[in-house]
Amino acid sequence: MTHDTDPASGAGRQSNGAHARSGRGDTDGHSEKTKGRGGKGLHRRTFLGGMAGAAGLAAFGAAGATFSLLTDGNDNEASAADATTATATLTVPDLLEGTASGGATSYTLTAKTGTGEVLSGVTSTTAGYNGSYLGPTMKWTTGDTVLLNITNTLGDDTSVHFHGAHIPPKMDGGPQNAFADGETWSPTFEIKDEAKTLWYHPHALGTTAEQVVHGLAGMIIVADDSDASAALPSEYGVDDIPIILQCLAVDSSGDVKYNVSGYLGAGLSYPVLCNGTNVDSTTLGFTATRKRTRFRVLNASPADIMTVQRGDGGTLTQIATDQGYLTEATEVTSIRLVAGARAEFVLDLEDAVTLQTVVTTGWIRGGSGTYDFLTVTPDASDSPADLPSSLNTITRYDTSAFTARTITLGQSGQTMTINGSAGTSMSSMAMISTTLDAEEVWTIKNGTQLEHSFHLHDVPFQLIEINGSTPTGVDLGWYDTFEVVGGGSIKIAMKFTDFTDDTYMYMLHCHLLQHEDEGMMAALMVTDG
């Protein structure tokens, strides 16, 4: 994407091939190959016409996301010839420099509007942090104290949520932290998280989808001094690479859509973006100067699911989920990310490899197909050491004495609910009250036929069941965002540590942003008891 800042403004799921998740199996195009050696992958868009109004919502949720994918019958043998030739260069977001003073590291962000090309050759109104689209990457270190000075020049209220961070509710950036145009919000907190990939984005009531789809999103890297971190690639932009994937809905004039009426409009395109660049007909290139390269992937789409895989059918070495390192590096054939989810993997390269994303429509209508988004070409002669045999120790919860709750995701027309309440205002939200150090197991029940992406603020959770099945493989890692298929359920366990407040609340919600804005959000109050 090319951008010109407006001068007047100054806006999960993984598969290891053997384990089928969510009761559906790996039927989402995971095995699809590039059509033709050295060419772009199969590009397929679903344009669903003739639907209008809320009456079509349930039908779209149940069936509108289906699509047919073809395979070329090639086997999984990888070779350099499988790599797609890059036609543009990967843009790596700037690393935001912090300023150390008074025992804290300060970061300055300005939310602003601008313009850019979401569709090639068409100007769109966009938004970003410190620029016209997306935002810089922040790198925090465990144990440090950070101070953020965030100024709003959007012309509307906003907030900035630090998605996945374990911080006090007063600093969490939820709806209670919204601040007006012209104001600066300055949260400060200690970094208690261990090494992981987080992200930041708006979270004000009713405007989250609108602001995020126009570009207000950025990545956060948490670094620590663990043995695993020392053994893994960590030089930002060199062998530690952020990948922000998005699928948007845009009309021919460049207007980016964010709500039901917009998505039901005629003549829409559904571009896929990687770090802000449209990859519908472009494959980005990255030259790896180290043989082992680490990739941090974020699905910043408002709704669509992104499945990352190799174009040659080879495996990815996954090292982390949303909330940090796995117990060990794990070979997977694909990494499925629902909206808001993250994962990390490494590639050890001898030949060029093309990364693809399989897009699955998550809400009403949208993009579906397979896209070659990045070709990684090695230009290195180093010899990386073997990966550590152990990355992390994850002690599985014994939930026999945990407090049990059921959280029901529901729908009434266009209104989305949690436990029967529509969270379109703070007063109308369902309230979940708990106490410090409480240990709980929640059954997240999807009472709709729509896809949902469940996100919990404050603490990470472990998966106990996925549609009645015991999790295995990478599903045994730590999460904060996870897929709940139509009519399905997940069971999760967590412990509420460190932070309490009698006024400020955390949120739990669907991270399909339109569902969140339509009411699928509840409040979580953690008190001293």
Image (cartoon, rainbow, N blue to C red):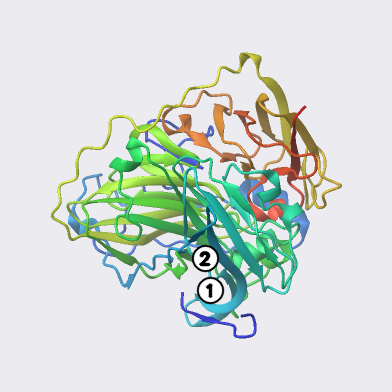
Q: Gap between marks 1 and 2, in whole Å? A: 7 Å
| Residue 76, quarter of the rendered image | top left
Q: Residue at x 15, y 51 (%)?
A: 382
Q: Would you say the residues marked 1 and 2 are in contact, meaning their CB atoms lie under 8 Å apart?
A: yes
> In front here: 513 or 386?
386
Quadrant for the C terminus, please. Answer: top right
Identify the amino acid type marked 2.
Gly
Residue lying farthest to the right in this orientation: 427
> In front here: 281 or 220?
220
Q: Residue at x 82, y 49 (%)?
A: 426
Is any part of residue 420 visible from this angle? yes
Numbered badge on residue 131 = 1
| Residue assigned mark 2 | 135
Q: Circle 2: is it few (<14), some (14-19), or many (20+) Cα within 10 Å? A: many
What x and y, as percent, mark residue 185? 68, 62
Compared to residue 271, the image places residue 528 above or below, namely: above
What x and y, as percent, mark residue 161? 63, 54
Residue lying farthest to the bottom in this orientation: 7
Mark 2: secondary structure: loop
Is any part of residue 30 visible from this angle? no
Identify the amino acid type marked 1.
Gly
